[in-house]
Image (spheres, grey):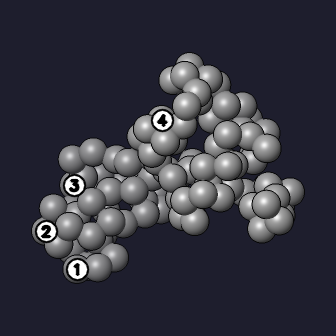
């Protein structure tokens, strides 16, 4: 089982950030980034972007990065995000099955 899949299993989270993967793995930074890129190419994981609303501090998944403004799903205000948080989600059925079985 890949180290990233193991981290998803242990965390019980749907989405994990790069910072989480790096801080909770014993692998080197290069190995983690290599595994992330490999899994992205194989479509085993998918990348999503999140922003934190400066008005209500809630986290919102970015549906489209084409617009400069993003609507907060909590307070419904339009915001210009300061920064974007990249998170990953397991997408492959085989790995989802492994998460359930292990």
Residue plotted at (13% across, 68% down): 55
Distance between the alpha carbons at the discs numbered 4 and 2 = 29 Å
Q: Quick one: label 1 or label 4, which is nearer the N terminus?
A: 4
User: Does residue 46 appear in the picture of this structure?
Assistant: no
Task: Identify residue for label 2.
Answer: 55
Nearer the observer, disc 4 or disc 2?
A: 4
Q: Quick one: label 4 or label 3, which is nearer the N terminus?
A: 4
In the rendered view of the protein, which quadrant contains the N terminus? top right
- In this rendering, position of residue 18 left or right of residue 42: left
Q: Is residue 4 above or below residue 98?
A: above
Label 3: state its secondary structure: loop
Residue positioned most to the bottom = 75
- In this rendering, position of residue 10 left or right of residue 23: right
- Residue 22 - label: 4
Label 1: state its secondary structure: loop
Task: Identify residue for label 3.
Answer: 80
Q: Is residue 80 above or below residue 72?
A: above
Nearer the observer, disc 1 or disc 4?
A: 4
Would you say the residues marked 2 and 3 are in contact, meaning their CB atoms lie under 8 Å apart? no
Residue plotted at (54% across, 37% down): 25
Distance between the alpha carbons at the discs numbered 1 and 4 = 32 Å
Task: Identify residue for label 1.
Answer: 75
Image coordinates of residue 23 in percent, x first then y, are 43, 38
Distance between the alpha carbons at the discs numbered 1 and 3 = 14 Å
Task: Please state which of residues 59 and 22 is positioned toward the viewer in this rendering.
Answer: 22
Label 2 Cα neighbours within 10 Å, binned few <14 / some 14-19 / many ≥20: few
Would you say the residues marked 2 and 1 are in contact, meaning their CB atoms lie under 8 Å apart? yes
């Amino acid at each position: 089982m890949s180290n990233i899949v193991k981290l998803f299993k242990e965390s019980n989270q749907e989405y994990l950030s790069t910072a989480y993967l790096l801080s909770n793995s014993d692998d080197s930074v290069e190995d983690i980034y290599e595994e992330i890129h490999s899994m992205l190419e194989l479509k085993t994981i998918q990348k999503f972007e999140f922003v934190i609303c400066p008005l209500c501090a809630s986290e919102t998944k970015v549906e489209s990065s084409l617009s400069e403004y993003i609507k907060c799903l909590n307070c419904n205000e339009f915001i210009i995000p300061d920064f974007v948080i990249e998170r990953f989600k397991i997408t492959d059925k085989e790995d989802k099955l492994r998460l359930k079985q292990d």
